[in-house]
Image (cartoon, helix red, strand yellow):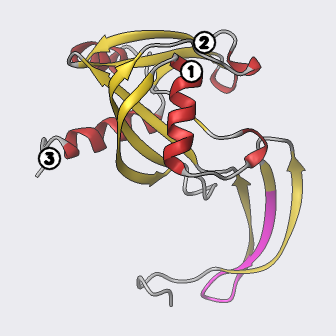
Amino acid sequence: MARDGGQVIRRLDSRVVYRNPWMTVREDRIERPDGSSGIYGVVEKPDFALVIPAEKGGFHMVEEYRYPIGRRTWNFPQGSLPGGVDCDPELLARTELAEETGLRAGRLEHLGFLHCSHGTSGQGFNVFLATDLVPGPHAREHEEQDMRQRWFSREEFWELVDAGRITDDSTVAAYALLLRHEGAFG
């Protein structure tokens, strides 16, 4: 039994089936608590930072074409360092904000840590609220060359969700952490 009361799945062996500069995919042979065996596919990616750049009752967001879903969508600025390099989450948040939007945060507040796709990956993300924003030039990576940026009101945020223009689960989850931070949830 695990400390949290859940059953433990034991890894018997593991092999890398795919690797590129952004991710590794491995297949683990496992043994379940009842002794039966199986396999588990795991995507390994580094944790990332997500930043909510807030001012004037709304947020700055970025939009880009997302190849896996075949369309453009809006989300809060987010990312990790190239090559899976680890760094301080606050430094990563400041870097991603400046790279993608050109904004610099006078104040950065940590709102929490969440996991995304925890059924297939251990990747998680730190959520930060950025305020006291100062504009500057962006420095987008080559892969972000089609990225656009725009400010949205809170009402427009939910209109984008309703219209299917925000489908990023990390963005919606981060917004929930912001609402909790603001006292909207008990």
Query: Residue 139 appears at what percent x and percent y?
Result: 64, 18
Closer to the camera in the image, 156 or 134? 134
Specify the segment rendered in magenta: 26-36
Q: Earlier in the sequence, mark 1 or mark 3?
A: 1
- Residue shown at 60%/12% (left/top)? 147
Disc 3: which residue = 185
Q: Earlier in the sequence, mark 2 or mark 3?
A: 2
Q: Is residue 96 visible?
A: yes
Q: Nearer the viewer, mark 2 or mark 3?
A: 2
Q: Which mark is residue 16?
A: none
Which amino acid, mark 2?
Answer: Met
Give the CA distance from mark 2 to mark 3.
33 Å
- Which quadrant of the structure image shows residue 181? top left
- Residue shown at 70%/11% (left/top)? 145
| Few, some or many residues within 10 Å of mark 1 (<14, 14–19, 20+) | many
Query: Residue 156 appears at what percent x and percent y?
Result: 28, 12
Q: Is residue 133 above or below residue 180?
A: above
Give the CA distance from mark 1 to mark 3.
30 Å
- Residue shown at 50%/17% (left/top)? 62
Disc 1: which residue = 100
At numbered mark 3, what does the secondary structure look like: helix, strand or loop? Answer: loop
Disc 2: which residue = 147
